[in-house]
Amino acid sequence: DQQVKQNSPSLSVQEGRISILNCDYTNSMFDYFLWYKKYPAEGPTFLISISSIKDKNEDGRFTVFLNKSAKHLSLHIVPSQPGDSAVYFCAARTGGSYIPTFGRGTSLIVHP
Amino acid sequence: EAQVTQNPRYLITVTGKKLTVTCSQNMNHEYMSWYRQDPGLGLRQIYYSMNVEVTDKGDVPEGYKVSRKEKRNFPLILESPSPNQTSLYFCASSQVSGNTIYFGEGSWLTVV
């Protein structure tokens, strides 16, 4: 039973355009959400996070939006660059456990 | 430099031959964990440890063992590897109270 779902295995975007990666969750106890980025032959690296008390967090070209009522979050990358091509993992955790649950990932390809 | 180091990075082994993948972190993190990444399945947690001598099963612990005798080390042991354990393995660590997980570069394991 997947508690964190990334329903799009892949996404293709033109350079300069917006990339939107989506993530849904089922556990209403999740209160902290993270996005990780993974290049081939490397380990995942932390990208951006958001607490459940917020609905938006921005860091440069990356913005994460959280819709608690819909149990949905999204990562926006504007403008997209070819170097953003990677697998993006959504993760969520509860405050009590500190142990995140990961989604299956979305492979983003940004075409020049 | 803060890092999580795994060894070996690449290994081909035969069914039934015991092997150990080592993991070491230099950040004095309490939490350490092992994940496996398989196509279409994302990151699945195998085992985790919240501190020395404290280990717990993750989502897919069958066929694996771990130990946490020292804070910095968290080896993954495959007592009798089978072909279905062919995968990409990641070790990770974080502070228990922290929000960011640091991953190693991954260990490619092939069991024939």
Image: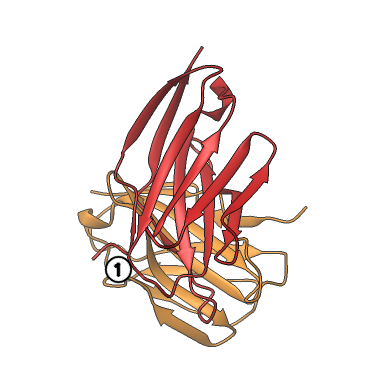
Looking at the picture, tell me which residue is in the foreground, A112 or A72.
A72
Chain painted in red in the figure = A
Q: Indicate whether B79 appears above or below B4.
A: below
- Single out the residue that lies furthest toward the front: A69
User: In the rendered image, which residue does mark 1 sit on?
Assistant: B60
Query: Residue at position x 26%, y 72% from top?
Result: B62
- Single out the residue that lies furthest toward the top: A112
* Percent position of residue A106, x then y: 38, 40
Q: Indicate whether B72 appears above or below B69.
A: above
Q: Quadrant of the N terminus of chain A?
A: bottom left
Query: Residue at position x 39%, y 65% from top?
Result: B45
**Shown colour of chain B:** orange
Q: How crowded is mark 1: few (under 14 residues within 10 Å), some or many (20 or more)?
A: few
Q: Mark 1 lies on which chain?
A: B
Query: Residue at position x 72%, y 66% from top?
Result: B27
Circle count = 1
* Percent position of residue B108, x then y: 41, 46
* Percent position of residue A69, x then y: 40, 62
In the rendered structure, which amino acid carries the disc numbered 1?
Val
Helix, strand or loop at label 1? It is loop
* Percent position of residue A71, x then y: 39, 60
